[in-house]
Each structure stands twice: as C-alpha cells, then as structure tokens.
Amino acid sequence: MSLAESCGAKIHFNHRVHQVDIDTNEIQFDVESKDEKQTYANHDLLIGADGAFSALRNAYVKKDRYNYSQHYIGHGYKELVIPPDENGDFSIKKEALHIWPRRNFMLIALPNTDRSFTCTLFLPFEGDESFEQLKTPADVRRFFEIHFPDTLSLIPNLETDFFQNPTSSLVTVRCFPWIHEDKNLLIGDAAHAIVPFYGQGMNAGFEDCRILAELLDETENPDWHELLKKYQHKRKINGDAVADLALQNFIEMRDKVADPEFLRRKFIEKELGKLFPEIFNSVYEMVSFSHTSYSEAIRSQHAQDILLEKVMQAGDFQTNLNNPSFQESLKNWMQEYHKAIKNIQASL
Ligand SMILES: Cc1cc2nc3c(=O)[nH]c(=O)nc-3n(C[C@H](O)[C@H](O)[C@H](O)COP(=O)(O)OP(=O)(O)OC[C@H]3O[C@@H](n4cnc5c(N)ncnc54)[C@H](O)[C@@H]3O)c2cc1C
C-alpha cells in the first residue's frame, strides 16, 4: 500500500462499496462514521479487486446474459496455531508443507515469519467426522487424540483456538464476462475465487495483474475496450483451469498422499524432471514453480498420465534405468510426450 501511495494512489479506509452503476462507474459507499451514503463518480476505469464476494461482480450479475456460478464444497476450515517452541524457534520443520491426510479430511501446517505455524483443519460440515460433531472442548480433544495425536503437544491452545476462530466455508466462483465495455473489470478473487488447495489463489490474482500491466505497457494510448477484452481473453481460461486444479488437489492432499502408489508416481515424476529437464516438468511443478499457464498445466495432465502409466507398468523405475531396452522405450515415450505437449502449446 505504501508503494501504491508513492505512485499516486489515494487510499480511503472504511469505505464499503454498497452499489455500482457499471455504465457510469458511479459508486455508492457506506462510510464508517457517516450516516449517509457517499457517492463517487467520474472514474475513467474501475477495477473490482474486492474479493470472492465482489460488489462490482454483484452489479454484473444483474446484467442480461451474465454467466455466474458459485459452489461451496461440503468441507469448511478452522485455523489453529502452533506457536514457536520454548527457544523461540520453529517447532516442526519449516521447509515443508505439513499434511496429516485422513482420506475425507486433513490438517495442514504452514510456517509464518514469526516462527509459528498456521494449522488449518479441513473437515466436512456435516456427517460422522465433521464440525457438527465437535460441540464441546472434550469433543475436540478426543477428535485430535484419535486422528492427530502427534499434534496435541504442538497446539497448546487447541480448545481455545478451536472455539474462538470461525468455521469458514470454501467457495469456487466462476463468471463471465470479467469486463464491461471500456469501463470496468474484475480481477483476482472477484473474477475467480477458488478453493485454497493448490495455494494459488493469490498467485492467480497477481498473474491477472501481471498480464494487465503487460498489456498497458504495450501501447501508450490504448483502446480500453480492446485492451480489456485481451486481458479477459488471456486470463479467463486460466481462471477456470486453476479453479479445477485446486479442486483436484484437495483429493490429492487429503487422500492420495497417503497412498504408496501415488508416492511412487511422485518420485518418478521428480526423477523424470531431472533426467529430461528440457521436456518434462510435473503438473505440480508447472503450477507451483514456473510461469507455465494454468491452462497449459491442466491440459498436460492427460499426457503425463499416459507417460507415467507406461513407466510405472514397466516395473521398478530405478532398476529399469540400468536396462538398455527400458532406456530405449523411455526415450520413445518421452518423444511422444514432447509431441503431445507441443500440440497443447500450439492449441493455446
Ligand atoms: C484458507 C485459505 C488459504 C489460502 N492460502 C493461499 C495460499 O497459500 N496461496 C495463495 O496464493 N492463496 C491462498 N489463498 C487465497 C488468497 O487468500 C486469495 O486468493 C487472495 O487473498 C485474493 O486476493 P484479492 O485481492 O483478489 O481478494 P481479497 O484478498 O479477498 O481482497 C479483497 C479486498 O476487498 C475488500 N472488499 C470486499 N468487499 C468490499 C466492498 N463491498 N467494498 C470495499 N471493499 C471491499 C476486502 O475488505 C479486501 O480488503 C487462501 C485462501 C484461503 C481462504
């Protein structure tokens, strides 16, 4: 925010958008400490970066032929804290994404700069093992004793955290268009709220910003409608792709990471990435550690499934690596894979 201000941005706190007229860009605000609504008008361009429950998007939804869907998954989440240890240090490994997968639910922990960890319990709202069953501190303790016994010594304020922190829901929002004429646009979660299981929601928003900034850099006096159309065209398929990837990764995190076959596949993916760095990058690496677009990543999944199935069916990967006939087959499979990826890239 300081950087934005140094570039000329003016920040108004405690102004909640009540209503937007998308044709005139007139905005009505509820302002804390003022009884009457404040109206601001005459904006050339309005950027709705107001999150999953965007007020600008609410105005779009009322338009004719506006496509909109929101879907809540059956799970909610609750945040808990692992504080630093008695020496003020991280109490578990800080370089890892910690996951306690339990098939239909899971606990994860991510490190913070103050050496604590934020733990998040993802659990169904209803059912046998669910938030609705955890009504008392004793219920919560029993649940953790059964499912996450090794975390009890790490989360000293389990019961307090649990009942003080909200149980929050998880929504996927898809909508189209993301723009209205040359007047306004949606960006970030306002355009594509996703479930958090790929850790990509904020990154996807920053990618929207990067693409918009690149388009702005391309011309000095842009045709705004054309520019916004290009922004939307480039980003919508990626918003959809990351929404799907995030939903898929929930199943991977809570269920598959406990499956030895899945872990074998992950190991082979890593090895293939080392052996063929120019050709192979796992979908996970594409999404998390590269600038490969989400749409390319999700479309590469099928080609990777075919490749990995062949490699895994051939037997023990490490033993096979010393076998000349396997080496030859692997080379051919990699060539086929490479061709498939080139086709995907050409189609985007
Ligand atoms: C549990 C969880 C874990 C996550 N983990 C990750 C992660 O590891 N990595 C990652 O990249 N992303 C993660 N995300 C997603 C990430 O938090 C969001 O994608 C990101 O914050 C979206 O940024 P945004 O600026 O578009 O919207 P927001 O961060 O939601 O910001 C919107 C802003 O608009 C304001 N606003 C809303 N309505 C109005 C209104 N009517 N008037 C005025 N102002 C308004 C809000 O107060 C807020 O300041 C996670 C999300 C959740 C729920």
Image (cartoon, rainbow, N blue to C red):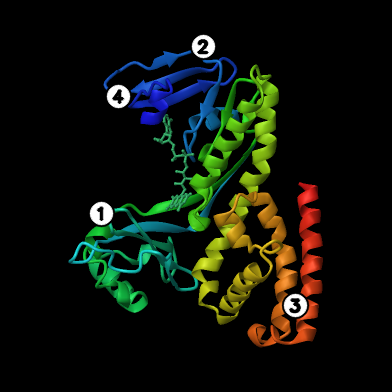
Label 3 to label 2: alpha-carbon separation: 61 Å
Q: Eyeballing the image, is 249 above or below 215? A: below
Locate residue 288, reporting x and y percent: 55, 56
Front: mark 1 or 3: 3
User: What residue does disc 1 label?
Assistant: 164
The local secondary structure at tag 2 comes to loop
4 or 1: tag closer to the N-terminus: 4
1 or 3: tag closer to the N-terminus: 1
Amino acid, disc 3: Lys
Depth check: give the residue in front, 166 or 111: 111
Tag 4 and tag 1, C-beta contact below 8 Å: no
Specify the label residue 32 is tagged with.
4
Tag 3 and tag 4, C-beta contact below 8 Å: no
When asked about the image quadrant of residue 320, the answer is bottom right
Front: mark 4 or 2: 2
Label 3 to label 4: alpha-carbon separation: 62 Å
Amino acid, disc 4: Glu
Locate residue 86, reporting x and y percent: 18, 66
* Apparent side of residue 264 relative to residue 322 in the rendered image (left or right): left
Label 4 to label 1: alpha-carbon separation: 26 Å
Amino acid, disc 2: Asn
User: What residue does disc 2 label?
Assistant: 42
User: What residue does disc 3 label?
Assistant: 310
Front: mark 1 or 2: 2
Query: In the rendered picture of this protein, how many numbered marks are placed on residues?
Result: 4
